[in-house]
Image (cartoon, rainbow, N blue to C red):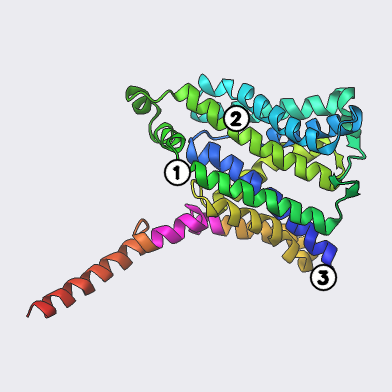
Amino acid sequence: MSLDYFLTVSVFAMINMILALSLNILIGYAGQVSLGHAAFFGIGAYASAVLTVKVGMGYWPALLLSVFISGLIGLLLGLPALRVREDFLVLATIGINFVVVSIFNYVKFFGGPYGILGLPRPSLFGHAFTTREYALYVLLWTLVVVFLVRYLSNTYLKLGFDALREDEDAAESVGVSSPRYKMYAFAIAGLLAGLAGNLWAHYMTVVFPDNFSFPVSIGILTMVVIGGVGTLVGPLIGAIIVTVLPELLRFARDYRMLIYGLIIVFTMFFMPKGIVGSIKGLIFGDTPLGKKRVEKVRRIAGAQGRIAGR
């Protein structure tokens, strides 16, 4: 395995980590199910492509502006979430994904089906990043995003998200504004997905509409669900699995994706709470096997206590 191949897979895995964490804020934290998250991913990528290729802006100001645009559009596209819930919200987000991809595909300004080519790599002092330097650059952003999401988990904003996720009506009754917190969730998720889109676009140096289609949204959701919805580590693990597993199965050639799909189905069937959620359940007794384990520990501890009392 060559170094460039390893770095490429690593870059994709880290970008997917950022994507999974961004969707987890919507689904795991705020309880807003979205099946159109690739739209925000694509908005960040296309915004940076337009700014650098068509407008002629440098990479660094384009990075800031593209992330801001993605967050702002995420805020605006979150407006349908104020009037719909559950299944209707799922359909609304799917529709948003199709609308965004259609705009990229049929508006000539965005290159149509031919996309936008020739995106520049980031550069410092006139030196364009090499593949190894770009991998370190993406790693830095991944660590920053993990830190920010970790910090968010310990703020009052997270408490508002928790209340919204558990019971929207009950949250409203105690003064939690569900429209405001929904908008916060969509804006933050849009910002982070836009960052991932920027990193992906300038690594590939091209963007095409199909790169952000509905199946991509399903892939992002798969990362979150496999790892564990609502956890910090779960989406990171899920992103690594979804990115690396198809590469490890390349020896199977034509059966690679079949085996990959079966592994995912097996994981979801036996670990419905995701890998991290299932491990927590096993440890703390949230699953039948975990409850038996905890009950056994309690019986042993009780027996030891009676023996010591004698």
N-term-proximal mark, 3 vs 1: 3
Q: Amino acid at mark 3?
A: Met
Q: Amino acid at mark 1?
A: Asn
Q: CA distance from mark 3 to mark 2?
A: 40 Å
Using residue 229 as the reference point, say whether residue 16 is left or right of it.
right
Q: Which residue is at a point 54% across and 35% down the rendered structure image?
A: 33
Q: Is residue 181 visible?
A: yes
Is residue 28 positioned above or below 257 on the image? above
Q: Are marks 1 and 2 in contact (CB under 8 Å)?
A: no
Q: Which mark is residue 187?
A: 2
Q: Amino acid at mark 2?
A: Ala
Question: Mark 1 or mark 2, which is nearer to you?
Answer: 1
In depth, the one of 126 and 207 nearer the eye is 126
Q: CA distance from mark 1 to mark 2?
A: 19 Å
| Residue picked out by circle 1 | 154
Q: Residues within 10 Å of mark 1 (few under 14, many from 20)?
A: few
Q: Which residue is at a point 36% across and 56% down the rendered structure image?
A: 286
In depth, the one of 107 and 257 nearer the eye is 107
Indicate the quadrant where residue 247 lies.
bottom right
* Magenta stretch: includes residue 127: no
In percent of width and height, residue 88 lies at: 54, 26
Q: Residues within 10 Å of mark 3 (few under 14, many from 20)?
A: few
Indicate the quadrant where residue 51 lies.
top right
Q: Which mark is residue 1?
A: 3
Is residue 288 positioned above or below 47 on the image? below
Q: From this viewpoint, which residue is outermost toward the front?
A: 125
Q: Residues within 10 Å of mark 2 (few under 14, many from 20)?
A: many
Q: Tell me the magenta residue range.
A: 267-282
Question: Mark 3 or mark 1, which is nearer to you?
Answer: 1
